[in-house]
Image: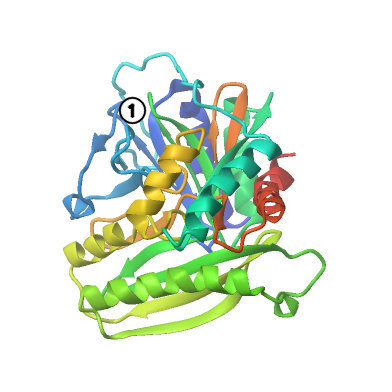
Amino acid sequence: MDSLQLINNKRIDILRKYINKNVSFFAYSLPETKEIIAGVQTKQMPETYEELSDLEGLEGFAIAPFDKNGPQKAYFIRNDINFEHPFTANFDSIEDFVAEESNLHQSSREEYAEQINCMLNELKQKKLDKVILSRIYLLNKEGRENAISYFLKLNEAYPSAFVSIFNIPKVGLWIGASPERLISANGNKLETVALAATQKLGKRAVDEVVWETKEIEEQAYVSKYIDDLLEKSEISDYKRTGPFTSRAGNVVHLKSSYQINDNLNFKQKTNFAQCLHPTPAVCGLPKEKAMNLIRSIESHKREYYAGYLGPINSEENLSLFVNLRCMRVFENKMALYVGGGITAESNPEKEWDETCFKAQTLLNVIK
């Protein structure tokens, strides 16, 4: 066993010790890395924040909901515990774990098709270009006791994803393997992506995938949104690559990558991230109309699905990802969140199948 595996095992052992105490913690691995980074906060409830720029100079893990105007808040989990040495931690008094399950509505195929048809009425009248519809898939008899094992399995199965687990008392325990970067900032450089459209890869090679017009247009909406935002932010020194086919587990997406070389300070970086969120890939365009349509049609609250999350360190570097391919974990069940982009050319049956492919990304590992 190599030294990195020993470090990872030690960190996971600590998380196993505290997961049933319902303290605030996080763990993650960045894409194409094997190291698991973890942190535990000794104060029971993390601090909330309004603006990402408020986190300048701090070290920890940021989590924000999909709908900033909804009931869920954005949280920042500090890294209070040094994982490299033996420690004794004194925590705030811990309440019994209580998970709210009242909003776990699992849509049927028929209901999902009805919701898509409602959206198609708006799209065909040219009231908006694209909107995202999501649904919940419930998995019973699997829950909190196995959460760390699921996190490790996802970490092993999807090395190109951002694999994460976090817990906040009264908020919930979430696990995910996201293929989509919101922004990554290291030094003067800033990176983001425009990712949309989904196909099942099957037995094909990645370079054998052919995209339909509807899928190409869906991804183009996201790219144009980022192009316009860069122009509005007066950012001119950047390189766009793509679109190209990108693999994420058993599915593939269309993706363009952006590398921004302007010398941005922490506030400029975080302001750009907040303008991006929620991206057209998880909300739609125009953003405000799409958000209102989602609120009126979806039969559940997204909470932290399609929000963003990721580490921020005291040197003002940050890696934030869209919370996709994720699930909320309860005592004895899990709620998997999946969705897809709806345009005027969408077919309800194909859209349902797309959500099934995405759910399989997690189910292949869990089951």
The image quarter in which residue 260 lies: bottom left
- Quarter holding the N terminus is bottom right
Frontmost residue, 282 versus 163: 282
Identify the residue shown where x is 46% and y is 76%: 257
For this rendering, which residue is in front, 122 or 226?
A: 122
Total number of numbered discs in the rendering: 1
Q: Position of residue 121 (x, y in %)?
A: 53, 52
220 lies left or right of 235:
right
Instruction: Pinpoint residue 103: horizontal percent, then vertical percent.
Output: 49, 26
User: What residue do we see at 29% from left, 71% from top?
Assistant: 229
Relative placement, left or right, of 9 versus 303 is right
The image position of residue 246, as x and y in percent, is: 60, 71
Residue 128, picture quadrant:
bottom left
In the image, 346 versus 27, the foreground residue is 346
Please give the residue where the numbered disc 1 appears in the rendered image: 89
Q: Quadrant of the C terminus?
A: top right
Residue drawn at (24%, 60%), measured in percent from left and top? 270
Q: Residue furthest right?
A: 203
Q: Within the image, what quadrant is residue 337 found in?
A: top right
Density class for disc 1 (Cα within 10 Å; few <14, some 14-19, many ≥20) is few
**SS at circle 1:** loop
Q: Is residue 309 visible?
A: no
Q: Residue at x 53, y 79 (%)?
A: 243
Q: Is residue 268 above or below residue 300?
A: below
> Which color scheme is applied?
rainbow
Task: Kindly identify the amino acid type of the residue bearing the numbered disc 1.
Answer: Ala
Residue 289 screen position, x and y as percent? 36, 52
Residue 223 visible: yes
Residue extending furthest toward the front: 125
